[in-house]
Image: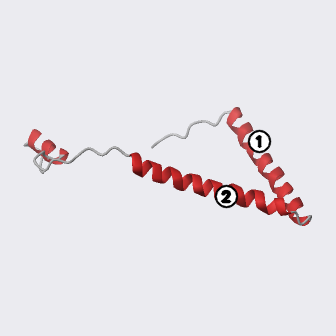
Amino acid sequence: MREIPNVNDASRTQGGLICVGVVVVGALFLLGLLQKSYWALAIPVAALVLFALGLTFWVGYTIATIQVDSFDANEPTPSETDAQASPDRPA
């Protein structure tokens, strides 16, 4: 069985700071909503839209620039090569 690594104090501190940051940002968001501020909705929506656009661009860029080796029908596949290399092993 795989052992779970020990979590050191720095990781716990970092996790705690992330939680505190989320609570502060959430409180600011709620405060903005209660004041009926346009920016309270505009900033998170803009951030989400920009994130989605960036992710979509990254997927498109990855698909457009991927390097694919040409497949030669005469070359044996890796499984065929392994089967030929060890005849005592069942295929």
| Residue sitting at x 71%, y 43% | 15
Tell me which numbered mark, 1 or 2, is placed earlier along the sequence: 1
The answer, for residue 33, to whether it is visible in the render is yes
Identify the residue at the far right of this view: 35
Residue beneath disc 2: 48
Neighbours of disc 2 within 10 Å: few (<14), some (14-19), many (20+) = few
Neighbours of disc 1 within 10 Å: few (<14), some (14-19), many (20+) = few
Q: Nearer the viewer, residue 88 or 32?
A: 32
Q: Which mark is residue 63?
A: none
| Residue sitting at x 13%, y 42% | 81
The amino acid type, in three-letter code, at marker 2 is: Leu
The answer, for residue 86, to whether it is visible in the render is no
| Residue sitting at x 51%, y 50% | 58
Residue beneath disc 1: 17
Q: Where is residue 16 in the image (x, y as percent from the top left)?
A: 76, 43
Write down the quadrant of residue 5 in the picture. Answer: top right
Q: Position of residue 75 (x, y in %)?
A: 12, 45
Horizontal side of residue 24 vs 2, given as left or right: right
Q: Position of residue 24 (x, y in %)?
A: 83, 50
Front position among marks 1 and 2: 2
The amino acid type, in three-letter code, at marker 1 is: Leu
Horizontal side of residue 40 vs 11, given as left or right: right
Q: What element carries label 2?
A: helix
